[in-house]
Image (cartoon, grey):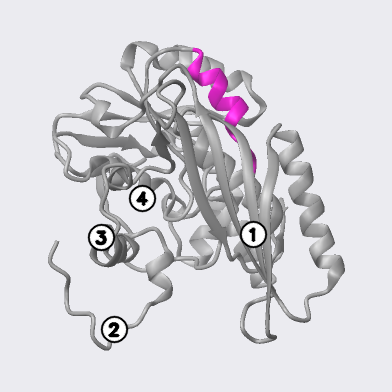
């Protein structure tokens, strides 16, 4: 790929948003240098087959959220659950995590104690072990309290291969509950707004394991940065099909809808940390949905749309009033540093 002229250009917050700017940054400055078939899939986790027997999934993520503690979670639980979920949506059972801390000089030790305690509880509840790590301390003013990197390894179940290449016209799109809560919970704490919105931060493996007991899942993704809209746009992009979603079916709670409207935000683009978007075959959609609704993290699961033959490469929202709206990828960043 021919590199664009980057002289005098700077990295912006939007380059970490999960939208168009981040995608361009990765494609223009990284993919051509790191080029290999595994990386080029651009999945949440790399699928590897080092032994010739069971395939493993490997993923890594960094967490720079501000503030460190927010309604429904903290940076510690977020780091554990976020990495677990990146493995789970590939159909891999999460087993092991690494954990690296970059700590700013002057951080109160009781804050670090609370964060590590939260990480221990989150990993234990998901039956995942933290097996290695690293700690660095930088001078005061050279970081923002603490940054955390976690990497994860999981075992791919039943030789499952989940890919957008499997998707066909007629497939249904499912999600396991309310959207937009995480980003707004972080924003409310950051800006001292008085709301009752809590983050949905949670590990998804046990829910996804129940989903995988029914054949028919073709693709899964957790809608974090950029929200549900970004995931759907990534699925539709350069595809021989379109996506139609129904606004009436979107699980958006009234408090999220009202707070989003006040801030001028669209819940479809707001980050989630305990949600999975799944594309499944039409004939298995009801069975998979039933399994999801039996799980505590899937009680509000619903079918929100389908893969269609028209509007190829685009996502179209059928509005409550009967109109249609094109859903595009984010250009800027609605809410920076929410993960």
Compared with 6, 281 (above or below) is above
Q: Along the line of sight, which residue is nearer the eye, 233 or 206? A: 206
Q: Main secondary structure of the magenta part?
A: helix
Q: Secondary structure at mark 3?
A: helix
Q: Is residue 223 visible?
A: yes
- Give the image location of residue 90, x and y in percent: 44, 33
Q: Which residue is mark 2?
A: 9
Q: Which residue is mark 1?
A: 100
- Give the image location of residue 316, x and y in percent: 25, 42
Compared with 336, 289 (above or below) is above
How far is the residue under mark 1 from the one under mark 4?
A: 28 Å
Residue, x 56% and y 22% (percent of image)?
A: 209
Q: Which residue is mark 3?
A: 27
Query: Magenta segment range?
Result: 202-213
In this rendering, would 32 be left or right of 208?
left
Give the mark nearer the N terminus: 1 vs 4.
Answer: 1
Residue, x 79% and y 43% (percent of image)?
A: 121
User: Which numbered mark, 4 or 3, is in the foreground of this view?
Assistant: 3
- Give the image location of residue 196, x and y in percent: 71, 54
Q: Which residue is mark 4?
A: 230
The quarter of the rendered structure image containing the N terminus is bottom left
Which of the 4 image quarters holds residue 320?
top left
């Amino acid at each position: 790929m021919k590199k664009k002229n980057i002289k005098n250009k700077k990295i912006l917050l939007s380059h970490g948003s999960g939208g168009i700017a981040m995608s361009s940054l990765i494609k223009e400055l990284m993919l051509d240098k790191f080029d290999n078939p595994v990386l080029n899939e651009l999945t949440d986790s790399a699928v590897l087959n080092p032994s010739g027997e069971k395939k493993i999934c490997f993923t890594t993520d960094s967490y720079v959220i501000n503030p460190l503690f927010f309604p429904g979670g903290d940076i510690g639980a977020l780091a554990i659950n976020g990495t677990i979920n990146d493995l789970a949506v590939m159909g891999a059972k999460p087993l092991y995590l690494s954990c690296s801390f970059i700590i700013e000089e002057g951080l109160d030790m009781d804050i670090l104690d609370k964060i590590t305690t939260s990480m221990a509880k989150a990993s234990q509840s998901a039956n995942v072990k933290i097996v290695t790590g690293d700690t660095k301390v930088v001078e005061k003013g050279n970081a923002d309290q603490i940054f955390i990197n976690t990497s994860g390894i999981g075992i791919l179940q039943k030789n499952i291969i989940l890919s957008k290449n499997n998707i066909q016209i007629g497939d249904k799109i499912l999600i396991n509950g309310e959207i937009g809560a995480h980003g707004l919970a972080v924003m409310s704490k950051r800006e001292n707004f008085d709301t009752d919105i809590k983050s949905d931060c949670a590990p998804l493996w046990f829910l996804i394991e129940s989903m995988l007991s029914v054949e028919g899942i073709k693709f899964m993704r957790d809608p974090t940065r950029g929200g549900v809209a970004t995931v759907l746009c990534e699925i539709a992009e350069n595809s021989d099909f379109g996506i139609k979603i129904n606004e009436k079916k979107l699980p958006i709670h009234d408090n999220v809808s009202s707070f989003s409207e006040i801030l001028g935000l669209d819940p479809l683009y707001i980050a989630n940390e305990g949600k999975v978007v799944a594309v499944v075959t039409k004939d298995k959609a009801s069975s998979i949905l039933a399994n999801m609704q039996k799980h505590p993290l899937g009680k509000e699961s619903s079918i929100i749309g389908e893969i269609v033959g028209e509007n190829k490469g685009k996502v179209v929202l059928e509005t409550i009033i009967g109109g249609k709206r094109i859903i595009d990828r984010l250009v800027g960043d609605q809410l920076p540093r929410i993960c």
